[in-house]
Amino acid sequence: MQRKFDDLLLGSIELFCQAAELGSFTLAANAASVTPAAVSRSVARLEERLGVRLFVRTTRQIRLTDAGRRYFEQCRQALSQLVDAEREVTGEQTTPAGVLRISMPTPYGHYRVLPLLPAFRERYPEVQVDTHLSNRNIDFADEGFDLAIRGRAPADSNLVARKLEDAEMVVVATPAYLKRAGTPKTVADLQSHECIQFELPSSGRHLAWTFEGNANEDGDVVTSGSYGTSGDALAGVTLARAGAGLFQTYRFVVADDLREGRLVEVLRDEGGRTRPFILLYPHARYLTSRVRAFVDFLVEQLAAPAAAPRAKRAQ
């Protein structure tokens, strides 16, 4: 196999990543025990090879260009895999170590995953966890993520998909709102209520509400209302807690509110529908031990047999 990277080029990539991480040629030079001029020459060597600028330089600071950011994410991941591979082969990595980057939706992150991270790090103290909470789809290669959690399996066959759980949906409102506007008894009653809307980032459309219902009412329902949110689904919960109207969310998000009476569940007989949460990661012949450990940990903590179907109400 023909060599594409000599020792000088690999060293230049390492120095480039140091400079990108630290935001300074001088700090990168100090960390690597070389001169700032050596770091600058290494970056210039890479820029000449690639034909693009990697940094925007001023007298006071450096910052990555768009091309530089993409190159940095790929190089950082590649260097990390080389370190992991060496540890694995030499037996040094008896326990997982290194940086683990995971992207997840805001509600699932706040209420299901983030509370588990201290227990994970107690078990694997050498793993540093970097979380990104967003409802948008991410690009594993361009953005350097190891794992993602999403609400549906992607069409991308290069990703492994493992279901974590099916989360039950509930419709809630404050006692004050229900006293003022009345309590809906059927799904059809929603047409006369303020239904807080959440805009899907992928399509820009409002997310339909989903119900189990009876033999004549089953499936997704388009609602309407004067309040709309986008980006963060927890904004809808905050509005509901403030008495703005009805909102459909996951039971795990409002469990404490329901238990303590701040919110009331409505249309319980029409409920019971769930939405899945799926763990995604790239197919790889070599999977780092920290990724394997985190996948096993989440499945252990969250994956559970599907709940038995709810009994239909008496007709």
Image (spheres, rainbow, N blue to C red):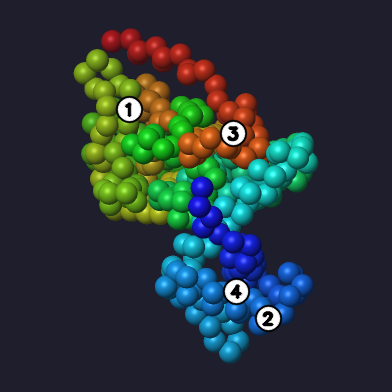
Q: Where is the C terminus found, in terms of image quarters? A: top left
- For the residues labelled 3 and 1, say whether their Cβ atoms are less than 8 Å apart: no
Q: CA distance from mark 3 to mark 1?
A: 31 Å
> Residue at coordinates 54% horizontally, 74% vertically from top-left?
45
Question: Residue 42 shows which numbered tag?
Answer: 4
Residue picked out by circle 2: 36
Indicate the amino acid at tag 1: Phe
In terms of sequence position, does the residue under pointer 2 or pointer 4 come before the other?
2
Q: Residues within 10 Å of mark 4 (few under 14, many from 20)?
A: many
In terms of sequence position, does the residue under pointer 3 or pointer 1 come before the other?
1
In terms of sequence position, does the residue under pointer 3 or pointer 4 come before the other?
4
Question: Residue 295 shows which numbered tag?
Answer: 3
Helix, strand or loop at mark 1: strand
Indicate the amino acid at tag 3: Val
Residue picked out by circle 1: 211
From the viewer's perspective, is 148 left or right of 60? left
In the rendered view, tell whether residue 303 sits above or below residue 124.
above
